[in-house]
Amino acid sequence: MEQMENWNEIKPWRKARRDELIARRVALSDAERLVWSERMTAQLNAGFPLLSGTVIGYCWPYKSEFDARFAVRNWCAQGAVAALPEVIAKAGPLQFRQWWPGAPMKPGVYDIPVPDGTPLMLPDVAVVPMNGFDAHGYRLGYGGGYFDRTLAALERRVLTIGVSYETLRLSTIHPQPHDIAMDFIVTEAGLYRAGGNPLALIDAAECAQAAKLLLKVRNLPRAAGLHSATGDAAGTAGYAASE
């Protein structure tokens, strides 16, 4: 594929690819999506077993995305805390609020459920839905830029796990300086190490070890007293879609 460098060309190209890939995902049969999702849930829990004590940010499934709630519930049963993002300002980062099964919820942007008044949290790990992804782990989001702004605003880099289906893979999204590659990508085909390097298929034990090392290098999870976001920190507690 020809490399594009002009953002005025890349932006409409991304919009066209995004629309195509969302339509492709929505057109998947329920049976196919169920099989893939069950496989991905098992891979997530096998590849990332050491998340006790972390705050895990994830997104409520939207437009037939992979449903991460089953994996998140398993992690929470092992001592993790879950949180969902909420839009606060169009041009700013999102904030996370704690979630648990049965937590009070309200409709958010696009009527996506968000926690209603639960504690603000700072994530250690982010399970990130991807409309598309490329050969180096860069993702195609919904075009709002929230995810990259939020990662940039956090005082330390969180562990990022992109989740998507193989049919949504692209050779490149023509990444720009503001794009941030996922550390890992999980599809129905397996676990990949990414981080801006060529995707490398790894087994669950190798994935768990690599994730453990990244958490240590990034000084995660945060101390218990730093998990709750208050004051100025509250505005940095979240993530959403990238361009």
Image (cartoon, rainbow, N blue to C red):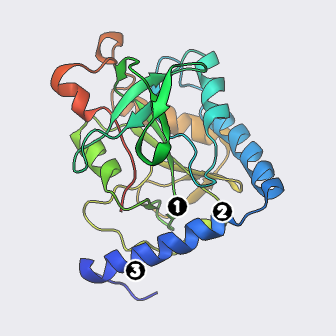
Helix, strand or loop status at disc 3: helix
Picture quarter containing residue 236? Answer: top left
Residue 117 in the figure: left or right of residue 5? right
For the question of whether residue 235 can be seen, the reply is yes
Q: Quadrant of the C terminus?
A: bottom left
Q: Residue furthest bottom?
A: 2
Q: Which of the two labelled residues, at mark 2 and mark 3, occupies the earlier sequence position? A: 3
**Amino acid type of the residue tagged 2 in the rendering:** Val
Residue indicated by mark 2: 26
Against 90, is 196 above or below?
below
Residue indicated by mark 3: 13
Picture quarter containing residue 93? Answer: top left
Label 3 packing within 10 angstroms: few (<14), some (14-19), many (20+): some
From the top left corner, tell me how far across and down residue 69 is, in percent.
Answer: 62, 34
**Amino acid type of the residue tagged 3 in the rendering:** Trp
Q: Which of the two labelled residues, at mark 3 and mark 1, occupies the earlier sequence position? A: 3
Q: Nearer the viewer, mark 2 or mark 1?
A: 2
Residue 201 in the figure: left or right of residue 119? right
Marks 2/3: CA–CA distance: 20 Å
Between residue 104 and residue 31, name the one nearer to us: 104
Helix, strand or loop status at disc 1: loop
Q: Which numbered disc covers residue 131?
A: 1
Q: Residue at x 42, y 71 (%)?
A: 173
Between residue 11 and residue 193, name the one nearer to us: 11
**Amino acid type of the residue tagged 1 in the rendering:** Asn
Q: Which numbered disc covers residue 207?
A: none
Marks 3/1: CA–CA distance: 14 Å
For the question of whether residue 58 can be seen, the reply is no
From the top left corner, tell me how far across and down residue 9 is, in percent.
Answer: 30, 83
Against 6, is 229 above or below?
above
